Image (cartoon, grey):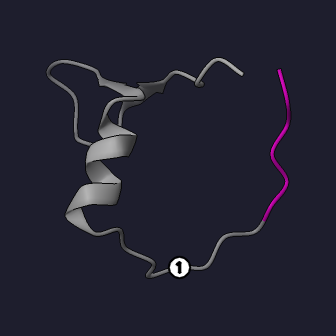
Amino acid sequence: MTLVETIYSTGVTLNKLAMAEIETQINRLPNLQKWFVEIFAKPT
């Protein structure tokens, strides 16, 4: 496991193609709001 300490800009959005790629790596948790997700890392 790696601790991420990077500071990200606010207000940054992704286009639909980029978001579709991200959606393949997350699992939205049922009955919870959209920001409750499990994130799976791509194998390296």
Query: Please, what is the dominant secondary structure of the magenta stretch?
Result: loop
> Which residue is found at the position 22% from the left and 28% from the top?
32
**Magenta-colored span:** 1-6
Q: Is residue 12 left or right of residue 44?
A: left
Tell me residue 14's x, y (percent): 35, 68
Would you say 3 lies left or right of 13 here?
A: right
Residue 12: say if magenta. no
The quarter of the rendered structure image containing the C terminus is top right
At horizontal 59% and vertical 24% (from top left) the residue drawn is 41
The residue under label 1 is 10
Residue 9: give x, y in percent of width and height: 61, 79
Residue 2 percent coordinates (x, y):
85, 30
Q: Quadrant of residue 22?
A: top left
Mark 1 residue type? Thr
13, above or below 2, in the image: below
The image quadrant that residue 36 belongs to is top left
The quadrant the N terminus occupies is: top right
Q: Residues within 10 Å of mark 1 (few under 14, many from 20)?
A: few
Front-most of residues 41 and 7: 41
Any part of residue 22 in sight: yes
Q: Residue furthest left?
A: 31
Residue in the image at 21% along x and 61% along y = 16
Tell whether position 2 is magenta: yes
